[in-house]
Image (cartoon, rainbow, N blue to C red):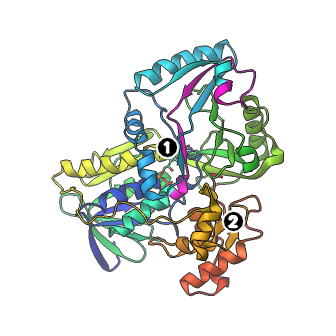
Amino acid sequence: MSGPLGRRFDVVVVGAGVLGCAIAAELAQTALSVCVLEAAPDVAEGASKANAGITSSFYAPPPSIECELIGESNDGWEELCGRLNVPYRRIGALTVAFDDDGVRGLDELETQVRAAGVKVERVTGEQARRHEPLLTDECIDALYYPDEGIIDPVRLTWAYAELAALNGAELRFRAPVLDVARDGDGRLSAVVTPEDRIACRYVVNAAGIGSGALSALAGGEEIRMWPRKGQYWILDRDFGQTLSRIVLPVPTPTTRGIEVAPTTNGSVLLGPDAEEGGDAEDRSTSAGNLRKIFAETQRLVPTVSLDRAIKTYAGSRPAADEPVRLRFDARVDNLIHAGNRSTGVSTSPAFGRRVKALLADRGENTAARPDRVTSLPPVPRVLLEADPVTVLDRRPGDAMVVCVCEQVTAAEITAAVTSAVPARSIEGVRKRCRATGGRCQGSICMAGVILLTANAHGIDPGQVGMGPGGGSVGCG
Ligand SMILES: Cc1cc2nc3c(=O)[nH]c(=O)nc-3n(C[C@H](O)[C@H](O)[C@H](O)COP(=O)(O)OP(=O)(O)OC[C@H]3O[C@@H](n4cnc5c(N)ncnc54)[C@H](O)[C@@H]3O)c2cc1C
């Protein structure tokens, strides 16, 4: 192990995805000092930027930790998203059956959902079409889940990171953990990045697909991990505005299925499929998979049309033999595993609270600090305002719309590039406020975004790059 001895922290969280940031946000509100180390240059670079943004009310049957964590998170979304300015809507979902096999699948699913204590209604095809008029006539039976919701998952990740930073957590990017140090009892005493050696009392392994490698590095349990890739179409909001619910088929034992899902910014996602193995960094889409996805979703909602497609993307779920991990390591006493393959967004609030509880069980003082920050300063978002003109009149400085497709003002972009965890690239701006993410994909507004970013950071416009994903952010 090498490197200078940097600051000492109570807790080092490895990974600035939705789980690492949620955990840091929760812990930073206590007396514990927190540092987040992220290999990538920004938050939400792994699975957290390439998912569907669905806040599931049901995924795995009880008894399971996934079922518990979803239950502990689901009721609180309105309150949390209100405090953190994260777009969220509880729109409901329909799981639909086309034939007798599907109906039997719904019977089994209904039993599981009811056992989990999740709100659900069994509805006829006709009733289901009243919930979602675009639903296919082929649907003969369905389950309606009123508590299923949609969220902006990237904005959520950033908001958790902001809250953590405003409460004193240190977030370091381009800081991959490459090594660790142990004390005489085999406990972790420090982690090592290329720049620094950071002493700590606990390490939280929220490294997504990198969790197995990190555990091995720390001398912890063997965690076998592999990517489960999923691909999507994004359809423009002129179609999205006509769809009210998430529509999905009867799930299989391994996946929830390829679905039609509105996003909080008005677009619609078709996908994802599930392909095991391969390269975790591979974010390419393929014509064959996309054709299949389109055909399957067209069966659910016949009016989906590729005339409305604005983009495709892919992301990999961090799959593992134990898909949800939230516990201390069996070998290394002060290493906590925090990982989730398929419902990391939906369970993130509970992950934060449960990690805090694990530390409280070890005798740590996890009481909330009286001076903690619990909400983020609101930034008016013209697109989401019922009466945008009034907002612009009230705040004339906001009136310059830079991104026409997503109606993002200069004020929103400035907030994104000057926040506690600021955007430094075009993709970073897109993640935080959607500018460049609409139907023109930045053709009109990119110059404005670059100038505002360069001004905020005092750099030359030529130094503002696309970002690690080449400007690609999923989730519509
Ligand atoms: C196609 C798809 C659809 C999905 N749909 C949904 C959905 O609708 N709803 C839902 O709830 N969930 C969904 N998920 C699952 C959800 O995206 C994941 O559960 C969640 O993003 C996992 O978050 P994470 O923070 O654990 O991992 P990640 O977001 O992958 O973050 C891990 C981070 O750790 C960093 N890292 C790794 N190793 C190191 C190291 N050694 N040092 C420093 N940093 C390191 C990585 O760079 C990465 O940024 C979906 C996932 C996919 C791929």
Identify which amino acid the numbered label 1 is placed on.
Arg
Residue 211 visible in rendering: no
Q: Earlier in the sequence, mark 2 or mark 1?
A: 1
Magenta-colored span: 129-155
Relative to 476, is 183 above or below?
Answer: below
x and y, in percent, of residue 335 in the image? 30, 54
The quarter of the picture where the N terminus appears is: bottom left
Q: Is residue 94 left or right of residue 284?
A: left
x and y, in percent, of residue 414 in the image? 56, 75
Q: Is residue 164 left or right of residue 51?
A: left
Relative to 415, is 339 above or below?
Answer: above
For label 1, being within 8 Å of ligand 1 is answered: yes
Residue 354 visible in rendering: yes
Identify which amino acid the numbered label 2 is placed on.
Thr
Identify the image quadrant of residue 442: bottom right
* Residue that carries the numbered disc 2 in the rendered image: 436
